[in-house]
Structures are given as C-alpha cells and as structure tokens.
C-alpha cells in the first residue's frame, strides 16, 4: 500500500523525511548546478517532468508520440503552466546545453527529442532521492528496488508527472511557498531553508533555521543578491519567515504555518511518487514484499 496525502502530511517522521530530501536535492545542485537548475523553479519542474514523461511514452506505432515541441506545448498550455514561447525557449535551452538531442534517425515532423545521458542520470537521481525519502517513513525498500531495476523509472515517472501536472494542489503551490517557487532558483532557496531546520522545536510557532548568509547563499545559487533579499523581505512581510536578530538579519526562523503549508504541498507530490512506483512494480511483477 502506498501512502495517501493525509497519511504523509500527518506522519510523525514526515518533516525528517523532507529535511533529508531537501539536503539530497541541495547536494545534487553542488555536483551539477546547471542541470539542477532545471528543477529550481516550479514552472521548470513542471516543464522538465512533463517533457520526460512524453519521452518515456514514445510508441513507434503512434505518429507524433514521444517528446516533441507540439506535444509539450499542448500539455503545458492546456494547464496554463507556461506560454507557447516559454515552451519553445525551454526546448532551445535544453538543446543549447546538450541536455536534449534530436532522436537518432528522426527525419519526420514533428521532430522528436531524447534526453542526453546527463539528463537521464539527473532524473534517475531525483527519483531515487524521493523514494529514499519515502523509505525513511516505513523502512521500505523503494530506493533499493529502483537501483536494482532502473527500468521501473520508465513506467513510474510518466504516471507521477501526469498526476502532478493534472493536480491543482501541486500545480498551484500555496501562496507562501509559491512566492519562492515561481521565481528562478527559488526552489533551491526553499530546499536550503528546509535542510537547515532545527526539528527539536518543530511544534513551536517559530522553527529555527539557524544562520543564513544571504550574500553567500545568492553567490552559491548564482542568483542576484538583490533578488534574494527581495524574496526574503516579501516572505517576512507575510510573517512566514523572520530573524531572531532583526538588525543583522542572520539567524532565521520560519513560521509553523509556512512549514505546514510546505509539508502539505510536498505530500501531494510524494503521494504521487509512491503510488506511481508501486504501480510500476506491480505492472512488472516486482512488488515490494513489505507492501
């Protein structure tokens, strides 16, 4: 049995699991910043996951299937995630950085694209991290199962991605979270904050984050310091974050309400990941014996 959204959101270990996941995603950025930035804003996350799903859904018997500009544009604009021009720019960027390439032998239109090996490695690492986060909740063997049978990702990822794209609760983050997530590299900032939480005071109205050097953080994530300070100021004005030392603004806290909204939002995605992976295991006869 996979976790439901409610089971995840109320799980006593869920915050520990999310802190682990945030740290894992932060480490991925440190080892490959350019490709990690493809998932660093919510719009890019939706574009990337949808593009990958289309790639896995390619069927040689179905004309126009697979990852094409037309296919990605139609899905993304239908759900009002991005404009047609944004989709075109996104594909161009992936081609420029060689994260994407024209499918071998592709001579027909619409042109079909396939992810480069570096992209495949990045997506596999993302799936592995999310499954490992779920394993922390029930001592499951999801991550080990994927490592042993990597082809499970081919089935699970499209199911998860489409579910997330079609689910408004994931597609439209809570305003407090969306303030960061709809901006460039905002997801990296939230991952950093969540990875630093002091969970000993998790039930308090304010949860300690510790020392946050905005200048160093902006430099590390290759974003404008002014942009980062503006984001933090807007969040502070809402009461979602603040500083224990208001003058120096170095020791940060986040509000209980912000944390609850973030947890609930992440629960939507992780429930989709869990369900899709369990489905993929069942479809291939590799069901987890603990399930």
Image: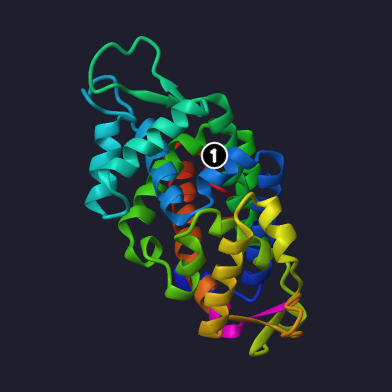
Render colour scheme: rainbow
Please determine whether, in this image, residue 71 is positioned above or below residue 202: above
Q: Is 27 situated left or right of 175 in this image?
A: right
Residue 192 on image: x %, y %:
67, 61
Residue position for label 1: 123
Residue drawn 59% across and 63% down?
226
Q: Does 29 appear in magenta? A: no
| Number of disc labels | 1
Residue drawn 48% across and 50% down?
278
Give the camera-side residue of 40 and 224. 224
Residue drawn 60% across and 39% down?
34
Q: Does 253 appear in magenta? A: yes
Residue 189 on image: x %, y %:
61, 61
Please determine whether, in this image, residue 164 is positioned above or below residue 157: below
- Res 2 seen here: no
Residue drawn 29% across and 21% down?
111
Give the camera-side residue of 121 and 32. 32
**How many other residues sit within 10 Å of disc 1, few (<14), some (14-19) or many (≥20)?**
many
- What residue occupies the far front of the structure in this picture? 226
Span shown in magenta: 252-259
The quarter in which the C terminus is drawn is: bottom right
Q: Picture quarter containing residue 23?
A: bottom right
Q: Is 289 situated left or right of 219 in this image?
A: left
Residue 272 on image: x %, y %:
44, 56
Q: Is 8 situated left or right of 162 in this image?
A: right
């Amino acid at each position: 049995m996979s976790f439901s959204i409610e089971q995840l959101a109320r799980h006593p270990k869920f915050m520990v699991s999310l802190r682990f996941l945030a740290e894992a995603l932060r480490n991925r950025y440190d080892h490959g910043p350019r490709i990690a930035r493809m998932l660093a804003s919510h719009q890019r996350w939706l574009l990337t996951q949808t593009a990958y799903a289309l790639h896995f859904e390619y069927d040689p018997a179905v004309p126009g299937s697979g990852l094409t500009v037309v296919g990605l544009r139609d899905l993304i604009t239908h759900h009002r995630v991005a404009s047609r021009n944004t989709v075109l720019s996104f594909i161009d960027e992936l081609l420029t950085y060689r994260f994407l390439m024209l499918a071998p032998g592709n001579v027909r239109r619409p042109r079909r694209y396939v992810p480069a090996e570096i992209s495949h490695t990045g997506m596999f690492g993302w799936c592995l991290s999310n499954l490992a986060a779920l394993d922390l909740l029930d001592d499951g063997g999801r991550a080990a199962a994927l490592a042993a049978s990597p082809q499970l990702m081919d089935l699970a990822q499209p199911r998860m991605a489409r579910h997330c794209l079609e689910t408004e609760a994931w597609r439209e983050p809570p305003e407090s979270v969306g303030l960061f997530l709809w901006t460039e590299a905002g997801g990296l900032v939230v991952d950093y904050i969540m990875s630093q939480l002091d969970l000993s005071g998790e039930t308090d109205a304010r949860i300690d984050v510790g020392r946050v050097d905005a200048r160093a953080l902006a430099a590390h994530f290759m974003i404008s310091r002014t942009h980062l300070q503006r984001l933090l100021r807007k969040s502070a004005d809402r009461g979602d974050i603040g500083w224990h030392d208001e003058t120096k603004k170095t020791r940060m806290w986040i509000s209980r309400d912000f944390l609850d909204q973030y947890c609930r939002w992440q629960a939507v995605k992780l429930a989709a990941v869990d369900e899709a992976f369990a489905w993929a295991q069942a479809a291939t006869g590799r069901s987890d014996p603990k399930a």
